[in-house]
Image: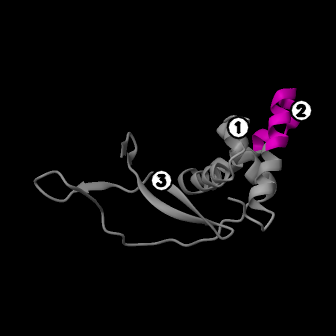
Amino acid sequence: MGTALGWQQTTTADLNGQPTMVQQMHRRCWITDEAGTRGYEPVAVTVLAPVALSLDDAAAVLFGWEISYEELADDKTVRELVADTVINQGGQRIEELRCQIDTPQELDAEQRVFLAYCRHRAAEVLFTGHPRE
């Protein structure tokens, strides 16, 4: 699957023991034969680094996706959105999202209610220690 930014490759992130599939935006694909069969560049470095997120970090990430209450009701979706943000957008994006929610007076009533729901879902799915399927 190609994008304007390059090719994507599926990887598995571990969110507190829950395997979560993420499409890595940076994995470039190259042609391996004359028939057009594609393969990925060989892996030279694998980075394993725990990324610590607070409850407000995770809530900000979910809030930043601007998806529906129904979509956030799915535990798998919550994990995928957080993993995707960490892997493909990184800490700088998470900090930008935190700045948006750290001034709740700038949010309207509907946004504050949705942010509270995002915080609830993040706590329920990511911070309980009891993953649900």
In percent of the image, x 83 and y 49: which residue is there?
Answer: 120
For marks 3 and 1 on the same chain, the one whose residue lies earlier in the sequence: 3
Graded by Cα atoms within 10 Å as few (under 14), some (14 to 19) or many (20 or more), the crowding at tag 3 reads some
Q: Which element carries disc 3, helix, strand or loop?
A: strand
In the image, what residue type sits under mark 2?
Gln
Name the residue at 85% across, 34% down. 112
> Residue 30: x percent and y percent?
25, 55
The magenta segment: 99-117
Tell me the crowding category of disc 2: few under 14, some 14 to 19, or many 20 or more residues within 10 angstroms, Cα based: few
Please tell me which of labels 2 and 1 falls first in the chain: 1
Q: Are marks 3 and 1 in contact (CB under 8 Å)?
A: no
Residue 27 falls in which quadrant of the image? Answer: bottom left
Main SS class of the magenta portion in the image: helix
In the image, is 109 to the left or to the right of 35?
right
Q: Please check the rendered image and state whether residue 107 is part of the magenta-colored stretch, yes or no.
A: yes
Q: Which residue is mark 2?
A: 105
User: How is colour applied across the structure in the image?
Assistant: one colour
Tag on residue 23? 3
**Magenta stretch contains residue 7:** no
- Work out how far the residue at label 3 is from the one at label 1, CA to CA, in angstroms: 22 Å
State how far apart marks 2 and 3 are (Cα): 35 Å
